[in-house]
Every structure is written in structure tokens, then in C-alpha cells.
Image: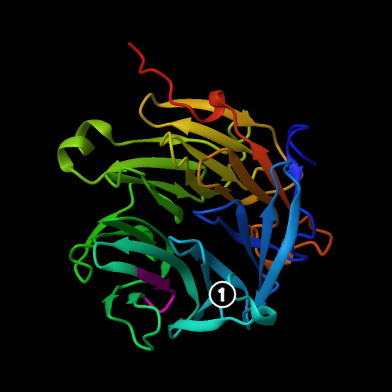
Amino acid sequence: MAMEPKDFEVTSPPPDSISCMAFSPQADILAVGSWDNNVRIYEVQPTGQTIPKFMYSHQQPVLSLCWTKDGTKLISGGADNAARMFDITNPQNGQSTQVAAHDKPIKCVKWVETPNGGILVTGSWDKTIKYWMLGNSSPVAQVQLQQPVYTMDVVFPLLVAATADRRIIIIDLNQPDKFKEVESPLKWQTRVVACFPAADGYAVGSIEGRVAIQYVDPKTASSGNFSYKCHRSKDGKEIFAVNDITFHPIHGTFSTCGADGTISFWDKDSKTRLKNMEPNAGPVACTAFNRNGAIFAYALSYDWSKGYSKHSPQAVNKIFLHATTDEEVKRRPPRK
């Protein structure tokens, strides 16, 4: 069920839970990863209609997606311990090539444009972050951590990852093999981290319906850091996981989505909720803005927050495209 009439439903969505989505940085092309082991690529028309274009497979569920800067290649990380690359300019019968490997599932893949060219960064449950040049069979560098990587984001030169035991890993990519480790300001397990577009901090979302805004520079952090509650029932008795945090590419505002089926848009600078989108018929698993922030994609899907036993075979798997409005994504003037 769409939230508003102008939300368009994506045709032929995955038949199983949707784990991740990513828009091309060059065109309105949406990639979707699923627990059915497949990556699907859709072309979004100016009318809002979608055309399924390509599909390729992992041997296990797909957990993460990213595009190269030129938008020609899509990279996916999977529970089969592999990262795979698909060239949309040469889509030979859904063939992809392996571009990275770990000893356990790859939970996060991120493409980073550095002064020396593009690098693939992979974060895994094998407690490592690895850096890859495409075409090399071994990583150019890696970081050994104490815990499995749960979530990771990059805005050069800032890389932020969150692991088990509420640890946050902060890396300056000018020195990619060194890291600082801090404890999450939130008391419960980290579900998602997202870097600010200005690369001066990050947002953290936990399973306990709470988000923290954290700056890297200690001077800014002392006055700028804060956390707040969200994704809870009106009486506050039911608490839901924050499943995804996505920053708007132009305005620097952000969205959160949760296991309660709601989506909210926020302005961290004025500490304001810009808009709340009404509950859906199930959890919102993941979200993505397109390259100019005019389209906001959200996936209704079982998010596994209640485990395998609560997964219904009749669970809804749908993706909607929402045309954003200024009131949802533009910053508010600071309060006097």
C-alpha cells in the first residue's frame, strides 16, 4: 500500500526480502539486492514507471550494493563471501565477475573515489575491512578488527563502520590502514551508520528506536553531538529498530526508516523532524535517494528483526518510488 497517491510501485520486485538498494550516480537506474540471491536493475522512467533491465546472481543472499562513480559498473556483496561486479554497458546474459573475497559474508561494499582513483572497500563478518583495486585478486590493504562488521559508510576521506559490541570504527582514508575505535553513544546494538555528506561526522541508528548524531572533530562534537528517540509507538511502549539512514545528496538532510513501517525526514542542524510518512503494512527495510534527491525509494519487506520464526511466507516485498517535496528534504532555518 503506497503512502501517498504519487508513490509509484516498482514492477517485478524480488520475491524474497529486500536487503539493499542503490541508485546509479549518473542516471535514474535503481539496483536492488535480495535474500533470493539476486541483484535486479531497473530503469526509472520520467513518468515514475519502472522497467526491469538486468539481473545477476550470487550463490547466497545479497547484502550490499554500490555503483562506480561513472555509473557503468555495479558491485554487490553477498553471504557467499564474495563481491561481484556487473557491467551494465556489457550485460552478457547476466554475467558478473568476482572482484573481492572474504572468509565470511561480505556485509558492506562501498565505492570510494580517492585522489589516486577508485577503490572498492568491503566490510565483512570475518572482522576485516579490505581495500581492492578492480582487477586485483588480492586486496591492496586491509584492517583487522576485533568484531564482525555490521554496517559501513564512506564519504571521502571519512569511513565509518560499526561492529558487534557497539564499537564504531573511524578511518581517515588518507591513512586507510589506521583506525580509531570508539563506543557507540547508543546503549543497544548498532543497525546502521551513515556519513554526513560534508564528511565531518556520521549518524548512528540502533535496534532500540534511537539515532545519534556524531561529529568527528572534538570541538564540534562537544556542542553538536546529540541523540533522539524515533520509530516508537505513540505511547512509547513499543520500540522498533532503525533499519536505514539515508542522506539527501543536495540538502544534507536525512531519512530514517524502521521496523514500525514509518519513514521520517530530519534536519540535524535545526534538530527538526521535517516530515513523517505514515505507517506501512510492514517494516521498511531500506531506502535510497537518486543522484539529485528528487526520487526517494523505499522497500517494504520483512527485516528479520524478529528472526526466522516470525517470517511469514505471505510477507509483502514491494518497492515504492516517492517524489520528494521541499518540505520533506529542505533544511529549516535554525531556531532563534
- Residue ID at (53%, 71%): 76
- Residue ID at (32%, 82%): 139
- Residue ID at (38%, 89%): 137
Query: Magenta region: which residues?
Result: 119-127
As drawn, is 330 to the left or to the right of 16?
Answer: left
Q: Tell me, yes or no, whether the highlighted magenta stretch contains residue 120.
A: yes
- Of the pair 133 and 32, the residue shown nearer to us: 133
- Classify 62 as above or below 154: below
Give the residue type at disc 1: Phe
Residue 163 appears in view: no
Q: What kind of colouring is applied to the model shown?
A: rainbow
- Residue ID at (55%, 23%): 327
Is the stretch drawn in magenta largely helix, strand or loop?
A: strand
Position of the N terminus, as image quadrant, is: top right
| Position in image of residue 42 (x %, y %) | 68, 59
Most extreme residue toward the bottom is: 137
Q: Count of labels shown? A: 1
| Position in image of residue 125 (x %, y %) | 44, 75
- Of the pair 259 and 79, the residue shown nearer to us: 79
As drawn, is 75 to the left or to the right of 261?
Answer: left
| Position in image of residue 195 (x %, y %) | 37, 49
Q: Quadrant of residue 198?
A: top left
Most extreme residue toward the left is: 219
The residue indicated by pointer 1 is: 86
As drawn, is 235 to the left or to the right of 211?
Answer: right
| Position in image of residue 143 (x %, y %) | 27, 74
- Classify 71 as above or below 199: below
Helix, strand or loop at label 1? It is: strand
- Of the pair 275 and 237, the residue shown nearer to us: 275
